[in-house]
Image (cartoon, rainbow, N blue to C red):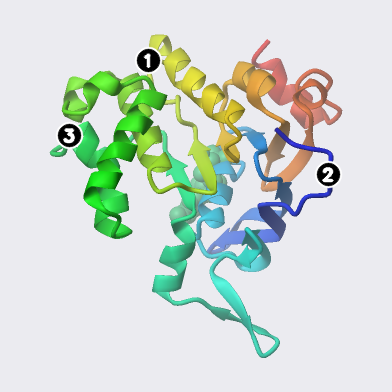
Amino acid sequence: MQSASPQAPLVRARNVHKSFDQLEVLKGIDLDVAPGEVVVILGPSGSGKSTFLRCINHLENIQKGSIEVAGEQIGFKPSRGRLVRLSNNAIARQRRRIGMVFQQFNLYPHMTVLQNIIEAPVGVHGRNRQEAIAEAKALLARVGLSDKADSYPRQLSGGQQQRVAIARALAIQPQLILFDEPTSALDPELVGEVLSTMKDLAQQGLTMIVVTHEIGFAREAADRVVFMDGGHVVEMGKPEEVIGNPQHPRTQAFLSRFL
Ligand code: ADP
Ligand code: MG
């Protein structure tokens, strides 16, 4: 949970601009996320939410502004008073601190659940295989799927697959985890189990940025809610402020759809 202490932010985004050719998608985003904080981003389709998450782990280049994670600028380093683009290796190293969970779970279909989870720690990060297996089993327990280690993704429900994807994102021991509409592809009856797993993680002190349309989750689990529209942060604050008493007409119009 967010504390009142003037702790250095884990994520510090300043004046972030991102365009695709002529289309300006992010028009100066400012956002700080404190360690352990859960930030939910709401906003209409096309407002730039996914693009912003993708900029945080440098899946997209930004044209202006800066994004720091744990005090290090993503994608660039200062050198002789200028910013120099990092090497691919250095960017890969930065990405290892950031987990990501997508709408489509993207599990490897030919690998078991356990193999999916240890793939990055062992194959990419060179971790000891036995240790990674022990940790993967602990992570499966954490997402309530201890009995599925040897199953293949096709043998699982969508909700179970997404919980495996969450365990896989946690397996790299990220400092920050980004969720992009993690329940949007699920049948309605499977949404609850994934949200409840995410609420558990939120309570365990993980730093999370969650793009979702699940207003109930935002209300219950978020320390802060950010409303984005048209590439801008229109409004942000505590859930009871932004959801309970939105000030901006665009936030009010967006939320009225959920009443
Ligand atoms: P959201 O996640 O809020 O729905 P996105 O970040 O996906 O919004 O998209 C914001 C805008 O950027 C949309 O108009 C979308 O079409 C555009 N966009 C996203 N990715 C690309 C891309 N790779 N190339 C061109 N346009 C893109
Ligand atoms: Mg999106």
Q: Is disc 1 in contact with disc 3, using a CB cutoff of under 8 Å?
A: no
Q: Is label 3 within 8 A of ligand 2 (CB to nearest ligand atom)?
A: no
User: Which amino acid type is marked by label 2?
Assistant: Ser
The answer to whether one can see residue 243 in this image is yes
- Disc 2 crowd, CA 10 A, few/some/many (<14, 14-19, 20+): few
How far separated are the C-alphas under marks 2 and 1? 41 Å
Quarter of the figure with the N terminus: top right
In the rendered image, the vertical position of residue 217 relative to residue 224, given as above or below: above
User: Which amino acid type is marked by label 1?
Assistant: Asp
- The residue indicated by pointer 1 is 187
Q: Residue at x 29, y 45 (%)?
A: 132
Sequence-first disc among 3 and 2: 2
Q: Nearer the viewer, residue 17 or 179?
A: 179
Quarter of the figure with the C terminus: top right
In the rendered image, residue 127, in percent from the top left (x then y), is placed at 30, 55
As helix, strand or loop, the secondary structure at mark 3 comes to: loop
In the rendered image, the vertical position of residue 220 relative to residue 65, given as above or below: above
Q: Which mark is residue 13?
A: none
Q: Residue at x 55, y 56 (%)?
A: 55
Residue located farthest toward the right when viewing the structure as drawn:
247
How far separated are the C-alphas under marks 3 and 2? 43 Å
- The residue indicated by pointer 2 is 5
In the rendered image, the vertical position of residue 259 relative to residue 144, given as above or below: above
In the rendered image, residue 61, in percent from the top left (x then y), is placed at 53, 65
Sequence-first disc among 1 and 3: 3
Foreground label between 2 and 1: 2
- Disc 3 crowd, CA 10 A, few/some/many (<14, 14-19, 20+): some
Residue located farthest toward the bottom when viewing the structure as drawn:
80
Q: Is label 1 within 8 A of ligand 2 (CB to nearest ligand atom)?
A: no
- The residue indicated by pointer 3 is 112
Q: Residue at x 67, y 90 (%)?
A: 80
